[in-house]
Image: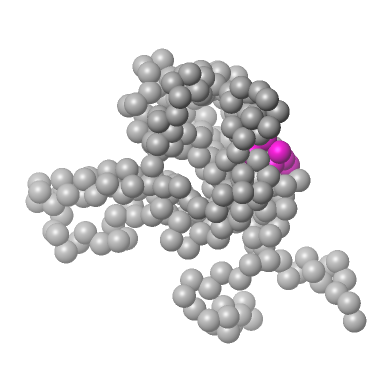
């Protein structure tokens, strides 16, 4: 007998608690339309709104967006300047909406690399939404996974040097408490758009057991329904964390 819709839904696993997205393909989207690269980034803002809406409605606790990597400074200066202006514009325009929808903003990365004005906007946005209890929205800006691990290691090394911690206490678990997003669940799902299949120095410590989902669509074309499709794909996956399928099944008997 064929499965009913109810049967199929019953087999779905829980939604991810934490979703991370590498928003790739903005430049190529613009190039194919003979538009300036910044037009692609502006179009991508709508996809950001769609991703936030889909995650908030689906019960996802944390959403982390890779907005600007530490390597992106190598791009043409006019594009970098445009991205900084777009970031400032988005903070000015969207933060009050986040607060209204009970979404908490956190920016991770080396914020010292930004202008004083942009740093103030970031601090203001984080302060305005700090009491929100819904979706946790993390923006990774001037962020790199290797930078993150090195920064965490320096914190612990300083504690060892000061005699506040013994060397043998420097464990993977302790290091994990110092990397970015340690206050939230580890990412369950990473989505990358644009057809590339790599994580590009994004949350490399946090991604130890993260499920990967790659879409050929450019980020501006990755809308609300595509986001739901990615979340539902995750629900069909069995996560074993080193165990066997039998062990996992036994836990749910």
Residue occupying image coordinates x 59% and y 26%:
37
Do we see residue 48 in this rendering?
A: no
Q: Does the magenta stretch include residue 221?
A: yes
Q: Position of residue 197 (x, y in %)?
A: 55, 53
Q: Position of residue 126 (x, y in %)?
A: 47, 28
The image quadrant that residue 113 belongs to is top left
* Quadrant placement of the C terminus: bottom right
152 drawn magenta: no
Frontmost residue, 36 versus 253: 36
In which quadrant of the rendered image does the N terminus lie? bottom right
Farthest right residue in view: 1
> Residue drawn at (53%, 40%), measured in percent from left and top?
65
As drawn, 238 above or below 190: below
Q: Determine the residue positioned at 39% across, 36% down.
A: 70
Residue under the image location 10 percent in, 46 percent down = 162
The magenta span reads: 219-224
Q: Specify whether residue 99 is in view.
A: yes
In front of the other: 53 or 69? 69
Specify the color scheme: one colour
Relative height, residue 166 to residue 132 (above, below): below
In the depicted view, which residue is nearer to us: 66 or 116? 66
From the viewer's perspective, tell me whether residue 81 is left or right of residue 2: left
Q: In the visual, does 192 lie left or right of 141? A: right
Q: In which quarter of the image is residue 231?
A: bottom right
Could you say where residue 35 lies in the image, as x and y percent from the top left? 66, 23
Q: Main SS type for the magenta part?
A: helix
């Amino acid at each position: 007998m064929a499965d009913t819709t109810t049967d199929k839904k019953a087999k779905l696993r829980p939604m991810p608690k934490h979703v991370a997205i590498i928003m790739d393909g903005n430049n190529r989207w613009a190039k194919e339309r003979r538009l300036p690269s910044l037009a692609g980034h502006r179009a991508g803002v709508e996809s950001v709104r769609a991703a936030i809406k889909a995650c908030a409605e689906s019960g996802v606790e944390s959403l982390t967006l890779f907005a600007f990597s530490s390597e992106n400074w190598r791009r043409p200066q006019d594009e970098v300047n445009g991205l900084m202006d777009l970031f400032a514009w988005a903070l000015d325009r969207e933060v009050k909406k986040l607060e209204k929808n009970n979404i908490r903003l956190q920016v991770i990365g080396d914020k010292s690399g930004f202008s004083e004005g942009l740093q103030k906007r970031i601090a203001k946005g984080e302060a305005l939404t700090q009491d929100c209890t819904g979706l946790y929205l993390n923006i990774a800006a001037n962020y790199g996974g290797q930078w993150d691990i090195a920064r965490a290691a320096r914190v612990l090394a300083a504690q060892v040097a000061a005699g506040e911690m013994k060397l043998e206490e420097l464990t993977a678990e302790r290091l994990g408490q110092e990397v970015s997003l340690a206050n939230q669940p580890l990412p369950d799902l990473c989505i990358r758009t644009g057809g590339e299949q790599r994580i590009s120095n994004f949350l490399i410590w946090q991604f130890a057991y993260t499920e990967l989902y790659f879409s050929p669509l450019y980020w501006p074309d990755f809308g609300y329904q595509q986001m739901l499709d990615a979340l539902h794909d995750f629900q069909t996956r069995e996560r074993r964390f080193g165990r066997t399928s039998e062990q996992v099944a036994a836990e749910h008997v």
